[in-house]
Amino acid sequence: MKSYPFERRSWAEPYKIKMVEPIKMTDPAERRAAIAEAGYNTFLLRSEDVYIDLLTDSGTGAMSDRQWAGLMMGDEAYAGSRNFHTLRDAVERHYGYRYTVPTHQGRGAEHLLSKLLIQSGDHIPGNMYFTTTRLHQELAGGVFVDVVIDEAHDPANTHPFKGNVDFDKLDALVAEVGADRIPYVCIATCVNMAGGQPISLQNLTALRRWCDQHRIMIVHDMTRLAENCYFIQQREPGQESRSIAEIAYDICKLTDAATMSAKKDPMVNIGGFLAMNDEQLYDKACNLAVIYEGLHTYGGMAGRDMEALAIGITESLHDNHIKARVGQVAYLGDLLNRSGVPIVQPTGGHAVFLNARAILRHIPQEHYPAQALAAALYADSGVRSMERGAVSAGRDPKTGRDRMPKMELVRLTIPRRVYTQAHMDVVAESVVDLYHHAEKIKGLRFTYEPEMLRFFRGRFEPIEP
Ligand code: F0G
């Protein structure tokens, strides 16, 4: 029992639960059979066999009563839906981008943008790769170049802004290929593959100056902008008394265009958009949207979904919401830190990342330790997580060999407003148990390997010693 006066007061979520969704409890034998049938790939499990689903925070959030009410306000006109105007107004009001093209989800926006801006042989620097983003860059003929600071590749490093850009790496790229072969720098806020790590306002401001000097655009992957803003508010000198909404607006103002997977920050189950300030670029984007997504005023989204998204944008920027959201991730991170489980430091905005290489020292990277750990976690407790290591990194398009990323991680991704603190306790206990019996876990080999984005549909079998 804590005694009065309390050192620190507890916080709780700024919402209460109005509807519940029962989840199935399974036994160990059922789970072992289910993961074997899924080829040891958590993407191939049936969701009804999952107890606590931490596969992703994408499209898995709980909408608010206001968002659900918004669904009833859908204007399902083919052209010029009222909800499109509500959405584009919300984007301009909160993010400042003047033009919005809805897309079916984030990768739809990445596809359009890559086609619009990349010529064959161009180089696209970014603060670490993301799977779909890089693939669309490559399909458009571009080459992705990682310019994130070295600290981002070290899971134990506690740098407060591991999403920052390294200007020496940018300068070296310009010296090598020339600024005219760099159409834009791709900047993600709260870098997913680095462990949900933020970029600082100061670093982004310096990047703006650098890009202006070289006449290069900045494209913002704003999928997890609100979480990045929270870290800026908490960690960046001079930002502590500013609101999340103010910081978000400032970040967007420093960039020229943005791709958004609306399934994350703004808490809708499906949707996204491409946003920008340049009218000519918007015109071209509309023409491409009509080919690949849908008319430029719906782009693959239902009118009702655009309404819920517009409401979700506003909710995502409330200070109390984001404090509770990132706070829940930190709660799980703290439990694992206290038990000595190696996780990416500091705990990120959307997920806790287990350092599979440090946990499974007996499994070489060619035997995919993170994939093996994710499968073992499911078998232990019905918790579904995701590999973010060599399987996700895929093969180098030139050499055809496995890319071996420095980090071999398992992502425990927390959906927004879905699980309780008790669920987090169950997850932590299962992870700690596995950590103490890690030697029982075996490496994996592919039995089926898709050509692209192989982590989604690949199948594996255990390697018997
Ligand atoms: N950019 C980032 C940083 C993402 O995390 C994602 C999706 C996308 C773009 C693509 O958006 O899925 O709407 O097409 N991330 C999901 C995840 C899949 O689980 O991290 P999408």
Image (cartoon, rainbow, N blue to C red):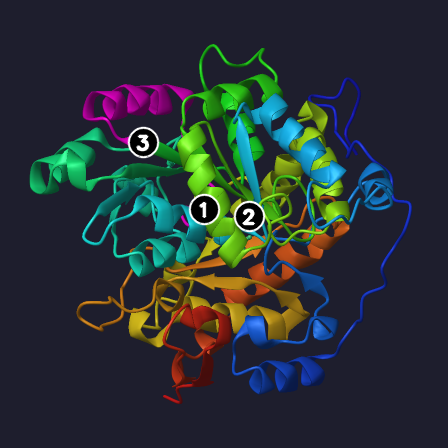
Task: For mark 1, give the secondary structure.
Answer: loop
Q: Nearer the viewer, residue 195 or 286?
A: 286
Upstream in sequence: badge 3 or badge 1 = 1
| Amino acid type, residue under disc 2 in the picture | Ala
- The residue indicated by pointer 2 is 351
Count of marks placed on residues: 3
| Amino acid type, residue under disc 1 in the picture | Gly
Residue 393, image x, y percentages = 35, 62
Q: Are marks 2 and 1 in contact (CB under 8 Å)?
A: yes
Tell me if residue 433 comes above or below residue 165 in the rendering.
Answer: below
- Residue 444 visible, this orientation: yes
Q: Is residue 109 left or right of residue 465?
A: right
Upstream in sequence: badge 3 or badge 2 = 3
Residue span colored magenta = 190-217
- Residue 155 visible, this orientation: no
Q: Nearer the viewer, residue 135 or 429?
A: 135
Q: Nearer the viewer, residue 55 or 28?
A: 55
Q: Nearer the viewer, mark 3 or mark 2?
A: 3
